[in-house]
Amino acid sequence: MKKTILSIALAVVAPFAWGQTSSTTTTTTTTSDGTITEYTPGSVITLKETSGPRRYRFGKTVTYVTKSGKTLDEETVKTRIKVGIPVHVHYTGEGDNMMVDRVILDED
C-alpha cells in the first residue's frame, strides 16, 4: 500500500520537478580611470579618459575609498570628490548602462 501511495505522489510531482529550469547571471565588474569633468552626487559622474569623455551612472549604493582602501564618510565625499580630481571607478554594464558601485580616489 505504501509503495502505491509513493508511486502516485511521485507521478504527480515529477512533471513539475523536470519542468524546472535554472539560469545563472554573470556580472562583470570593470575598472576605468580618468579625471572628473562632471559630478552630480548620487546621479552621474563623467570622466575624461584617454579615449575621450565617458559618462557613468551611480548604482543604488556607491562606496568611496582612498587609494589605500580607507572608506570615506559622507562629509569627506562632499569635500574631496569634485571636478578635476583623478579617480578610478568600478562599474558593471556597458553602453548607456554603466553603473558605478565604487569610486577610488587616486590619492590618500
Image (cartoon, rainbow, N blue to C red):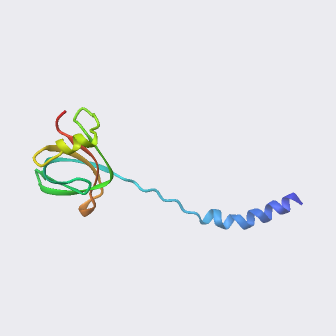
Q: Is 107 or 28 nearer to us in this picture?
A: 107
Residue 19, image x and y in percent? 60, 66
Which residue lies at the image location 74% right of the left edge and 66% below the top edge? 11
- Report the number of discs: 0
The residue furthest right is 1
Left or right position of 26 against 29: right
Residue 8, image x and y in percent? 79, 65
Taking 70 as reference, is 81 above or below it? Answer: below
The residue furthest front is 75
Quadrant of res 95: bottom left
Q: Is 70 or 24 nearer to us in this picture?
A: 70
Left or right position of 50 against 93: left
Residue 48, image x and y in percent? 11, 52
Left or right position of 79 against 64: left
Residue 41, image x and y in percent? 23, 53
Which residue lies at the image location 77% right of the left edge and 63% below the top edge? 9
Left or right position of 13 against 71: right
Check the picture and name the quadrant holding the C terminus: top left
Quadrant of res 38: bottom left
Check the picture and name the quadrant holding the N terminus: bottom right
Taking 93 as reference, is 81 above or below it? Answer: above
Which residue lies at the image location 85% right of the left edge and 59% below the top edge? 3
Q: Is 17 or 100 nearer to us in this picture?
A: 100
Which residue lies at the image location 10% right of the left edge and 50% below the top edge? 50
